[in-house]
Image (cartoon, rainbow, N blue to C red):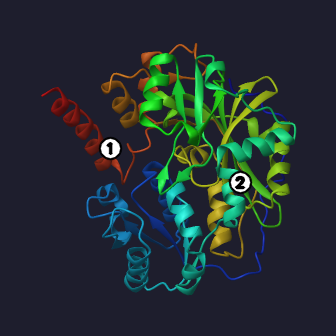
Amino acid sequence: MVLPAPSPAHPSPRLVDTGRRGAEAFLVFGGTNLRAIIAFCRELERLGRSFSIITRGVEDALQKTCFKSHIHAVRRKDQLDWTDISRAITQAQHQSGKHSFCICPSSEALNRFLLDHRTELAKLGCTLPLVNAETYHRISDKYSFQSICQSKGQPVPRMYLSVNALEFPCVAKPYRNLVDGRILYPVILRGDTDLQAFHHQCDAGEYFYQAYVAGPSHYLLFYVRRDGSDVRFSQENLLQQAGGKSIVMARSANLHQAPIAESYKSILIGLEFHGLIMIELKGGGGHYTMIEANPRLWGPLQLSMDGGSNLVRAFIQDQLAVRAMSSGATDIRSARYFWLGGVLQNLLSQHALQKHPDNRRLRFSDIACGVCSDIYLRPGTARLFLHEIIHTFTMRRRREI
């Protein structure tokens, strides 16, 4: 359900003078959150802004895109290692001729790693467009941010205090996203079999249990500046990979113009937050439950640009301190997001796609229309689109053999 558009909540586009010096270029780390990275690089190119890419090994998928010419360094180690990272940054500076970088906040593990090395990054001429580590963790970690939202009167999923009290379906969520270098993800439990498998594979002490929230799913998206002004957008999620994984189909929405958006903006300002953030909400009709927040790029980032939002553009221009920049929303329009590769990966693994809401009817025409909006089936990334489809079917055939 897309909410009817109320009167505009933001002023018309205006010119703003940042009054400060910014970085010369963006630095983008490849290897994870590829769809968001590609969308971000597209916007950088559209705006004519300089950027360098550090890939995660020579087989990084970015090698199969039009952004290959921006690859100025390659990580030698798969794990995040400061010696390797600093070497790659220095190499990217030398290859690009740029001395000051703003690092794209592309993934959870990378952000947390770089926050631990903020001082060293500054010495290398790199800025990190993130809040301090304590605030970042309070928002990104699911238990702490849900506690904050609940204290501000925002509904959160009902919590189970013991395993014996569980009602299926439910969700096991990690208290902290990163433990001993491992990223932990929520696990949907639909019965005793799932619960037994969860206890076998995970340390239950690192998780808490909540009721599964059904209904429409939305992302409420903000770019909040240091002065408290913001640019916002929203999307309705229609189709998701099994187990609450990646969104594969979504459409633009008007939730960012509803009163709930101002409530969450107030929470963020109270935490002295600035930067990019995605807040997942479930529900409708003015009643929304907060699921989680990610203060970084999100997978369907392309939808905000296709939907006419200035959100990503404002972020880019602020970090590079472009003197004349637009702010607020402009031509917000109906748009769709689709990721065929993610759909096929899910279906070929014999898992049912997760629909939002759960009783939504999925037609073949939805898939057919969605392909026209595919994140990769576009100029500059068509080769990656074909590679992903072929690779998905090849891996399925190998498993069958």
Amino acid type, residue under disc 1 in the picture: Phe
The quadrant in which the C terminus is found is top left
Please report the residue visible at 73 percent of the width from the left and 81 percent of the height from the top: 20
Of the image marks 1 and 2, the number of the one nearer the N terminus = 2
The quadrant in which the N terminus is found is top right
Above or below 130: residue 385: above
Q: Which mark is residue 119?
A: none
Residue situated in front as seen by the camera: 339 or 16: 339
**Residue 268 position within the rendered picture, expressed as x and y whole percent measured from the top left:** 79, 53
Q: Is label 1 or label 2 in front? A: 2
Is residue 310 visible in the rendered structure shown here? no
Residue situated in front as seen by the camera: 87 or 337: 87
Q: Is residue 368 left or right of residue 176?
A: left
**Residue 207 position within the rendered picture, expressed as x and y whole percent measured from the top left:** 59, 38
Q: How many marks can you see?
A: 2
Q: Is residue 10 left or right of residue 49?
A: right
Above or below 159: residue 80: below
Disc 1 secondary structure class: helix
Amino acid type, residue under disc 2 in the picture: Arg
**Residue 83 position within the rendered picture, expressed as x and y whole percent measured from the top left:** 40, 78
Q: Is residue 390 left or right of residue 148?
A: left
Q: CA distance from mark 1 to mark 2?
A: 37 Å
Above or below 138: residue 67: below
Disc 2 secondary structure class: helix
Residue at the left extreme of this rendering: 401
Q: Which mark is residue 138?
A: 2
Q: Quadrant of residue 32?
A: bottom left
Q: Which mark is residue 385?
A: 1
**Residue 24 position within the rendered picture, expressed as x and y whole percent measured from the top left:** 56, 80
Residue situated in front as seen by the camera: 146 or 359: 146
Q: What is the crowding at mark 1: few (fewer than 14 residues within 10 Å), some, or many (at least 20)?
A: many
Q: Quadrant of residue 376?
A: top left
